[in-house]
Amino acid sequence: MGKTDWKAAAKALKKKLRKLTDKGADAPTKAKKAKPVSPLAPASFPALPQIKGAEFSAVEAGVRYQNRKDVMLVRLAPGTIMAGAFTRSSTRSACVRDGQAKLLMKVPDGVGAAIIVNSGNSNAFTGKLGDQAVAAVTSAVAKELGIPAARVYSSSTGVIGEPLPYDRITAKVPDLAKALTEAAIEGAAQAIMTTDTFPKGAAATVQGEGGVINIAGIAKGSGMIAPDMATMLVYIFTDAKISQSSLQKMVSRNVDGTFNSITVDSDTSTSDTLLVAATGQSAAAEVKGTTAKAFEAALHGVMRDLALQVVRDGEGATKLLEVRVTGAASDEDAAKVAFAIANSPLVKTAVAGQDPNWGRIVAAIGKSGAAAERDKLTIRFGDILVAKNGWRNPDYKEEDGASYMQQPELVFAVDLGLAKAKRSVWTCDLTARYVAINADYRS
Amino acid sequence: MGKTDWKAAAKALKKKLRKLTDKGADAPTKAKKAKPVSPLAPASFPALPQIKGAEFSAVEAGVRYQNRKDVMLVRLAPGTIMAGAFTRSSTRSACVRDGQAKLLMKVPDGVGAAIIVNSGNSNAFTGKLGDQAVAAVTSAVAKELGIPAARVYSSSTGVIGEPLPYDRITAKVPDLAKALTEAAIEGAAQAIMTTDTFPKGAAATVQGEGGVINIAGIAKGSGMIAPDMATMLVYIFTDAKISQSSLQKMVSRNVDGTFNSITVDSDTSTSDTLLVAATGQSAAAEVKGTTAKAFEAALHGVMRDLALQVVRDGEGATKLLEVRVTGAASDEDAAKVAFAIANSPLVKTAVAGQDPNWGRIVAAIGKSGAAAERDKLTIRFGDILVAKNGWRNPDYKEEDGASYMQQPELVFAVDLGLAKAKRSVWTCDLTARYVAINADYRS
């Protein structure tokens, strides 16, 4: 058995991959390599409604990237209500810990708020320096905007373990403040990108009592500059009049079915942050009763839309996969099976190869730790019944499965046949490009 | 933003990868493509001691592969003691369930035993047909060798969900029986390979009371023919005189630190099987007291050696990584952290890229769910202190990390600084070749 020089082969391959990466877009500057846009990207950034009381700006601060905007600021009008959700990582970043604490603080009525976000450096695992950086940045914004520092939220996304050069950010705060406008949300969505291949936005409107309520959100996620995590940052704005407790309850209720139901590579970030700000400046009356239901449904829609955009921009993704589990013995079991399938490298590489390889779904169910009985399982590709009664459906034709797998958006539906619990999660395929993106040495 | 044709790019890449795969070895037949041998493979198959009372043979039965041996038989002398461990997958195969049941059966003294294994088809998720296949194969062996079917163990590895063409196996049982010899263990190790790139064997000898005790084992694992799992099969033979309960206890005690401490891609197989057979034909007295300690240590060594060989043959592997966790609050937490790191696609791609990307280790610790405190963590690459006190070690130099990562065998040591629990696990890197191997359509 002759030995191949794999190292050399991998090197050549990487070079090849890098070349592929550089095609398809003009090189914008010599400092930055152009990135191909995900084939699953929406055609364009959506038209988002302006949210009265929410103003945006973005600047080039040179935190890590050159020749692009990398810091964005949001000013939120007096009286804005804040709610949110954060990563549960035990190594979460300084700004995540700071934001969690601020969300729990009692705030005087009628005080404004702000969100400042930088890309290029996550300020995670940076010790006491990290806390100092958060204090410096949020204080600078507080001073400039004349609001308490306790109302200034910050996020950072990018390299882990490098001290954040926060003076580059504080130096730009006056410029950021001057440029604030309700129209600039798309620029903000661009400034928070790391290796995202497209900016992410979503919106909804709800008919309230006496007026329209608008919701507009932006997100970043799943792009990566080595050595970043698949960090996800989401900011949603609404002009709804709503109490903090109602808003927070809605956010908490809907985060599991949206952002907590996506996975690109099973690697949880140290920076994941979702903030929802309600300025209360809609003409509509306070959100209650049936309006509350409609508003929550609309909010869920925006959260889900942004969550799916993160998966669509999953590193190297060419397919969007929904794993739909039903018939589980408990909610916990449904989640275990759904994530075991969605995180299985073997399932994800089969999807990349357009291989209707349902045996790997069986194996993922088996390893999940959830209650499952071979003879009660049903597996479907979309509407195609693939397996039931503990064996392949005798009417299933491999060519039907193969043809189904050609589609860019897939549903793998698993019914465990035990009880009524269910869970859907979304993921993307695992391609050689994912490896190339993440095996590249930081430079 | 122009869109790149990723599908075409991936196709071209796959073609490229396939070409790389085909270099470095002569194409043995037109039906089978040659496989490069893992760069982490041992120089050659080790010289294994013959185990008195254990005879081997292998044949070409054409279960799925052509032009190679794909079924092996072991005959174990009357009085042989059997012990084992099996996958806990809820979708485990028919032969695994059968073996588990047989191991619990009360056996009359002085009866022989046998193991028959085929590659190419795992007989998993094959419903009632699967049970029939196991019964047919084990009965044919029982009849041919004149032993009870309850003493015939079988394993199958390969495609999931396809009916096992067991008549091809039963037809060859007489030939297998005729060819049995104590010297043929290497042929058996070869017959159970799927896409393993080398046969795996390990041995040890122990000085018993009044004679030498030999241990010899073979394994397969981590090779793959789409759509197989990273199935692992292990058979260890010894001439020790030992009681079933002692042997089973030793196996159970040592399986967690060996086979249950390796992971190639976090995808648990439906077929994992470890069987240990003691023929009792050594001249040494029964294994007890200090001999028991020495024997157990030797058995552990063989188990560990075979386990590490499976990782060394991990699909696409170019690096062997030990993740060594100490200072955890509990054994469970130590395992959580060790496997979170070892299964992290971001850690594994960084290893592939020789990137000393310790930020990804921090993130993996954070997501593990285990108790961890930023300021008590210590991270080392081998002996290089990378991070402590919640931040990068000020004396750490990136170039030292980069130089360390060039080695083929790496240790990432994480001390959580909380208590005394520890766990080591072994894994390999995640390369573009892993994706290429597993994204290829079955054909």
Image (tube, coloured by chain):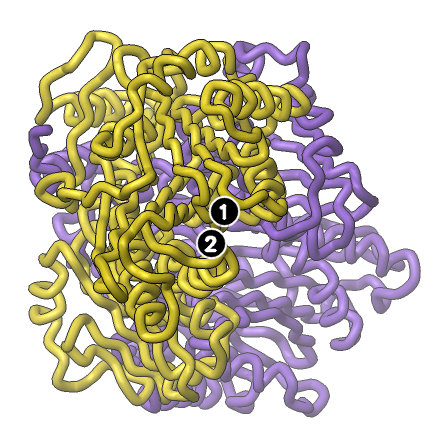
Chain colours: A yellow, B purple
State the mark number for residue B343. 1
Hey, which quadrant is residue B413 in on the image? top right
Label 2 sits on residue? B266
Q: Please give left or right for residue A100 compared with residue A315 in the image.
A: right
Assign the N terminus of chain A to one quadrant of the image: top left
Task: Name which quarter of the figure residue B366 lies in.
Answer: top right
For image coordinates 57% across by 29% down, the residue present is A149
Subunit ID for the residue under disc 1: B
B178 to B149, vertically: above or below: above
Amino acid carrying label 2: it is Ser
Label 2: element kind: loop
The reply to whether callout 2 and callout 1 are in contact (CB within 8 Å) is yes
* Residue at far right of view: B289
Q: Nearer the viewer, residue A217 or A267?
A: A217
Residue kind at label 1, given as amino acid type: Asn
Q: Is residue B196 left or right of residue B276?
A: left
CA gap between label 2 and label 1 equals 6 Å
Q: Secondary structure at mark 1?
A: loop
Residue A374, horizontal then vertical, whole percent: 39, 83
Say whether disc 2 or disc 1 marks the residue closer to the N-terminus: 2
Query: Image point 43% across, 28% down: which residue?
Result: A116
Total marks shown come to: 2
